[in-house]
């Protein structure tokens, strides 16, 4: 079942001269995770569609952990960083700016509906046996997201777990969380997920999906919809 449609953002320094996808050619791009990170694969797919090039060859990807890459961007050792949304939020609160979000990439790849990129997984047999508990969990998850979307007090209460009590950082994190909350989960969004999977298969190949070349419709539990 869906959790969030927020994944990542391509961030650049406040004084960067980068303005478009084409400006990334020849640049050092920090990538949180590894070569099979889905945000990186989608950026490569976007560049292939728009420019006819493979950024893995036409730019210099630098793979690493998000905190390290944030520091590398601050020190000017990389030109941009493709990182997870909550690390991007911290960068933005510190003055960096977004060049392109993963949501932008998905739309420009021709997918018009929101696609949850993170989700909850559970055993099929458990869901069949505990349908009431499952629906209760779905409702509780949506209520919690609605609360976090609107309440600054809840974010202040969570500050010790987040690791900062800076109002600017908390506000940016809240905005990013709110933007990532799925509003709908219907057959249209399920089809969009299948379409996106096909793109990832094309770019990531066997190393990403192995023999699972076709999206399995059973991935999503049928009774969860809103």
Image (tube, helix red, strand yellow):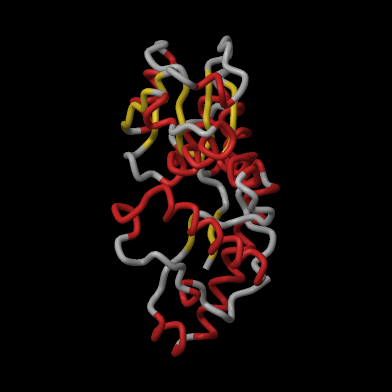
User: Of all residues shown, which one is farthest toward the bottom?
Assistant: 129
Does the rendering let one see residue 21? Answer: yes
Q: Residue at 44% across / 68% down in the picture?
A: 214
Q: Residue at 51% across / 78% down in the picture?
A: 134
What percent of the width, then of the height, locates residue 31? 39, 32
Q: Relative to 131, is 77 on the left or the right? A: left
The quadrant the C terminus occupies is bottom right
Above/below status of 140 relative to 50? below
Above/below status of 10 relative to 194? above
Above/below status of 106 relative to 23? below
Q: Residue at 60% across / 59% down in the picture?
A: 144
What percent of the width, then of the height, locates residue 93? 57, 24
Q: Residue at 68% across / 63% down in the picture?
A: 184
Does the rendering let one see residue 85? Answer: no
What percent of the width, then of the height, locates residue 175? 64, 39
Q: How many marks?
A: 0
Q: Quadrant location of residue 67? A: top left
What percent of the width, then of the height, locates residue 90? 51, 28
């Amino acid at each position: 079942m869906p959790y969030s449609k927020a994944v990542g953002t391509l961030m650049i320094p406040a004084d960067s001269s980068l303005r478009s996808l084409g400006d990334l050619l020849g640049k050092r791009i920090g990538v949180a995770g590894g070569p099979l990170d889905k945000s990186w694969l989608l950026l490569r797919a976007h560049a292939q569609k728009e420019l006819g090039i493979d950024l893995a060859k036409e730019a210099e990807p630098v793979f690493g952990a998000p905190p390290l890459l944030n520091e590398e961007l601050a020190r000017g050792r990389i030109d941009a960083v493709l990182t997870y949304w909550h690390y991007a939020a911290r960068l933005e609160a510190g003055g960096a700016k977004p060049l392109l979000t993963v949501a932008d990439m998905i739309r420009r790849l021709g997918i018009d509906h929101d696609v949850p990129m993170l989700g909850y997984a559970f055993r099929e047999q458990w869901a069949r046996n505990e349908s009431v508990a499952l629906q209760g969990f779905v409702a509780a998850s949506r209520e919690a997201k609605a609360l976090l979307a609107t309440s600054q007090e809840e974010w202040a209460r969570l500050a010790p777990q987040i690791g900062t009590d800076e109002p600017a950082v908390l506000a940016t994190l809240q905005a990013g969380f709110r933007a990532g909350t799925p509003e709908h989960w219907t057959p249209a969004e399920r089809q969009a997920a299948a379409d996106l999977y096909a793109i990832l298969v094309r770019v990531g190949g066997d190393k990403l999906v192995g023999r699972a070349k076709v999206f399995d419709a059973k991935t999503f539990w049928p009774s969860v919809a809103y």
